[in-house]
Amino acid sequence: MPALKPKISNYYQDKKPSAIRAAQILFLKRKDKVTSINGAIGNVTLPMHPAMQKRMRELGAKGSPFENGAVIYSATKGVDEANEAFLNILHSSGFETKGLHTQVTDGGSAAMELVVLGVSDSIREKGRPILLLDPAYTNYLAMAARTDRKVITITRHLEDSGHFSLPDFDKMEKLIKKNKPSAVIVIPYDNPTGQFMTHAEFIKLAKLAVKYDMWLISDEAYRELFYTEDSPVSVWKLNEKEVPGITGRRISIESASKVWNACGLRVGGLVTDNAEFNDRAIAEYTSNLCSNAIGQYIFGALAHESKNDLQKWYDKQRQYYKSMMFDLNKRLEDLLPGIIISSPDSAIYSVIDFRNIAPKGFDTADFVKFCASEGKVKISGKLYTLLSSPMAGFYNIPAGKENPGKTQIRLAYVETPEKVKLIPELMEKLFNNYLKNTK
């Protein structure tokens, strides 16, 4: 009689890889010698801030906490210096930090999970839902599923002009009245859309949060990465004069990954003006013991950088991405007339929509799979393929209903400039090859 096999949970049996990682998983199974240009994952390849690099190179130097080779736990809250670094960064952008409470987490992802756990009760406890703007960063949908929290969304639409329409605030208020969410999560420098939320729009959202007793959570991983003529926005730019009652309901999610080019460092942060939330979040995080001690030390170097130095760093990062994004958009529109590319207003992503040039039934999930598993294009004697993320997984659309993401992909500008320059030609040829193969 064969031995019985242990049962995998229903949750695991139904689990599929994130839309962001799916292409890379497929590509790694290939045996041919094709070079991938990875636009699927926001895995920044630029060097970290010089002060962080210096600490990384001198981990074992005299005076370092690791000079004797031991790496011990930090406090669950994180070391003081890393917490101060988050506050110094906020200060450098011109925001008041008095009265803010911080904790360090293993990347922004751990901070997301703490937020989801802390602002809403589970479905089985009949907890109030969390409101997101569709398309939404996939990890929020995943964290909600993992923690048994309900999510509701209001959809933004990508116009032919390349601009995502912000949801009508009157419609949003009707949705809030009907569903009574406990919190609203927004990414002002948006992933995946690249949309930039202005301070005036933020005020409107904040007033709804106060009126309907919601937490206002702002994911600010891309703060300072904007390419319009606006000034930086933040949940910490809001004040009681503009939004009476906003104090005590604000939370921001921070990260070393994007602005500081340290994705693999896995350092994130949770900032709030609610002391009790901070205490409870740290208590919950004690189960994780602490975040990366070496990463905290490297990131902590930013606690000592001046506002002037950090502003120069922001300018440098903005110029790097802006020129790359605008150039790619123009070249791709020339090669694929009729394609829709989201306006490059912030963050490091574009949403590309094939709806006006693709045949009926076209699904970017299949196109992305083709590119990752078999697609290849020879450029200058070398074989390449392109990895991207199908957008259907970024929308919280019930099965059976039309999902605008079926004709869209998200592209991240994270490879070297030399590789990014290949993307327009590569995408045009892969798209046409895919159409020939599926006739």
Image: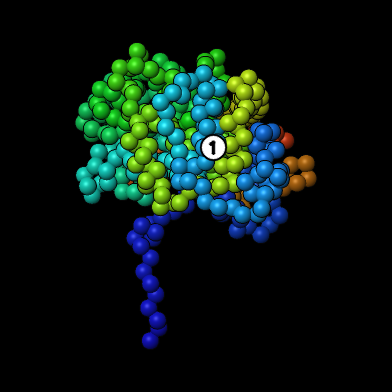
Judge whether 84 appears above or below 204 on screen: below
Please name whichever residue, 390 or 317, is drawn nearer the observer in this view of the structure: 317
Q: Residue 179 sits in which quadrant?
A: top left
Q: Could you say where residue 245 lies in the image, as x and y percent from the top left?
A: 29, 20
Tell me the residue at 60%/21% (across/down).
307
Residue at mark 1: 82
Q: Could you say where residue 217 lies in the image, as x and y percent from the top left?
A: 38, 31
Q: Could you say where residue 94 lies in the image, as x and y percent from the top left?
A: 51, 18
Judge whether 10 appears above or below 398 on screen: below
Tell me the residue at 55%/44% (across/down).
266
Relative horizontal placement of residue 153, taking residue 85 as reference (left or right): left
Tell me the residue at 41%/47% (across/down).
285
Badge 1 density bin: few <14, some 14–19, many ≥20, Cα 10 Å: many
Given the current orientation, which residue lies at the most extreme right position? 381
Given the current orientation, which residue lies at the most extreme bottom position? 1
Q: What color scheme is it?
A: rainbow
Judge whether 229 appears above or below 139 on screen: above
